[in-house]
Structures are given as structure tokens and as C-alpha cells.
């Protein structure tokens, strides 16, 4: 059947409108809660194994008494699919440390998430030079810091993805090594990564001390 002139014109305009277009950014992945919970259990067991090994940051004299690291109960509300938003400036940033000279990092972007009844934003970093392990690094403090968690904050690692969509699981937040041995030098979260909400997920201090 022949295409009428008006229909042909509409088809041509539609094809022209799509010319040069490319797919938009991939939407954040929908988290599989049960799979993530199972992965979290395996991650905890691996960390406990590390703490018992010769590579443990726990001093040898205290290592024999170690049983397991304490955590908050798994909270799916702190498991979110997020996009890494670009930031205007990605120059080298020097993060303060618990001792010694500041360490250089590159700002890789920012994540924004809903928790505690508000929108929260954290800057995401990547280490430079010999410290670059290929991971993205999110140091932060929150309203539990200094009470239920280490006052110097906690860390969260993200694996880079080609399109900037991530499953961010705060249940995998962990304490820096200087919690176990003060001789370690650890990066300190910057002012921009100090949350006002309570992140009741991830590693915590032992109850009662």
C-alpha cells in the first residue's frame, strides 16, 4: 500500500528527530534485598577472617581474644540504587588524616540518597598513585559517630561501573584500621561528608564500650 504524502512527511520528521540521539543514562539498578543480605553475611565472615589473620590490624596480643566485629542489624532502607552525579571540579583534594600528612584524592562525583526524612549528599573519591586500588571511596560521619560508631567516621567502598549507576549499601560501612590500632594513619571525612542523620547500618562499636 502506498504511503500518503502527509504520512510520509510525518515519518520523515520522526526519523529526523531521532537522528543523532543516543540512549540516556542507565537507571539505578533495583536492589535485590535478599541477595544483598546474603552477600552482606559473606562479607562479614570474610572481614572476621581477616581480623584473625596475620594481616589483621588488631595487635597480636589482643587478636587471640577476638571473636567477631559488631554490626547494626541489616536495614534495607539503607540499600539504594543511586547514580553517581558528576561534579564541576574534580581536582585533587587533600583529605586530613589521623596523623601525618594529608592524602591526595580525586573527587569522582557525588551520590544523593533519601534517609532520615531528608535528602543527603556525599562526595565520592578515588585515591591517587600507589593508593589507587580501583575502588571509589566514601568516607563519612553521621549522628552515630562518637557514640555508637567511631568518632572519626566510617568508610564505604564502591566498585566503578561504566555508566555510573550503583547499588549503594550502607550496611557495608566499616571502621578504619585506626579503630583497632592507633598507630595506623587513616583519612578523615571532610566537612562535606558529615551527615546529620543517624546511619544505623554497618559496623558499630561494641555495645557498652
Image (spheres, rainbow, N blue to C red):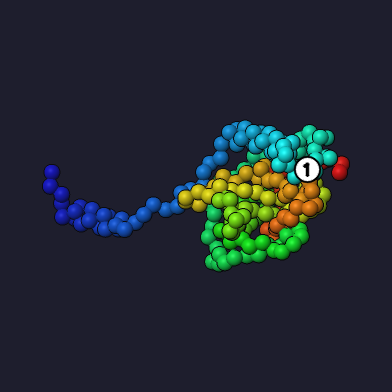
Can you say which quadrant of the picture contains the N terminus? top left
- Residue located at (58% from left, 33% from top): 35
Q: Position of residue 61 (x, y in %)?
A: 84, 40
Q: Give SS at disc 1.
A: loop
Q: Position of residue 198 (x, y in %)?
A: 74, 49
Q: Position of residue 29 (x, y in %)?
A: 51, 43
Q: On the image, which quarter does residue 45 sit in? A: top right
- Residue at mark 1: 58
Return the residue nearer the eye: 26 or 208.
Answer: 208
Q: Residue furthest left?
A: 2
Residue 99 can be seen, yes or no: yes
Q: Position of residue 15 (x, y in %)?
A: 26, 54
- Residue located at (68% from left, 50% from top): 155
Is 162 displayed left or right of 80 in the figure?
A: left
Residue 143 can be seen, yes or no: no
Can you say which quadrant of the picture contains the C terminus? top right
- Label 1 neighbourhood size at 10 Å, few (<14), some (14-19), many (20+)? many
Is 69 displayed left or right of 128 in the figure?
A: right
- Residue located at (31% from left, 58% from top): 20
Is 84 displayed left or right of 188 in the figure?
A: left
Is 79 displayed left or right of 209 in the figure?
A: left
- Residue located at (56% from left, 58% from top): 108
Q: Is residue 98 above or below residue 204?
A: below
Q: On the image, which quarter does residue 38 sit in? A: top right
Amino acid at each position: 500500500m502506498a504511503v500518503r504524502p502527509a504520512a510520509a512527511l510525518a515519518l520523515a520528521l520522526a526519523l529526523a528527530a531521532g537522528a543523532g540521539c543516543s540512549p540516556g543514562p542507565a537507571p539505578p539498578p533495583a536492589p535485590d534485598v535478599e541477595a544483598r543480605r546474603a552477600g552482606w553475611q559473606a562479607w562479614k565472615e570474610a572481614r572476621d577472617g581477616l581480623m584473625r589473620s596475620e594481616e589483621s590490624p588488631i595487635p597480636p596480643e589482643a587478636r587471640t581474644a577476638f571473636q567477631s566485629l559488631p554490626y547494626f542489624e541489616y536495614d534495607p532502607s539503607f540499600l539504594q540504587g543511586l547514580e553517581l552525579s558528576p561534579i564541576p571540579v574534580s581536582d585533587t583534594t587533600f583529605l586530613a588524616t589521623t596523623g601525618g600528612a594529608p592524602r591526595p584524592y580525586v573527587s569522582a562525583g557525588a551520590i544523593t540518597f533519601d534517609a532520615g526524612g531528608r535528602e543527603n549528599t556525599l562526595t565520592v573519591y578515588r585515591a591517587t598513585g600507589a593508593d589507587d586500588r580501583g575502588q571509589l571511596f566514601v568516607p563519612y560521619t553521621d549522628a552515630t559517630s562518637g557514640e555508637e560508631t567511631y568518632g572519626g567516621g566510617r568508610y564505604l567502598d564502591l566498585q566503578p561501573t561504566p555508566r555510573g549507576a550503583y547499588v549503594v549499601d550502607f550496611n557495608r560501612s566499616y571502621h578504619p584500621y585506626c579503630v583497632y590500632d592507633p598507630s595506623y594513619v587513616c583519612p578523615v571525612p571532610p566537612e562535606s561528608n558529615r551527615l546529620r542523620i543517624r546511619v544505623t547500618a554497618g559496623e558499630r562499636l561494641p555495645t557498652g564500650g
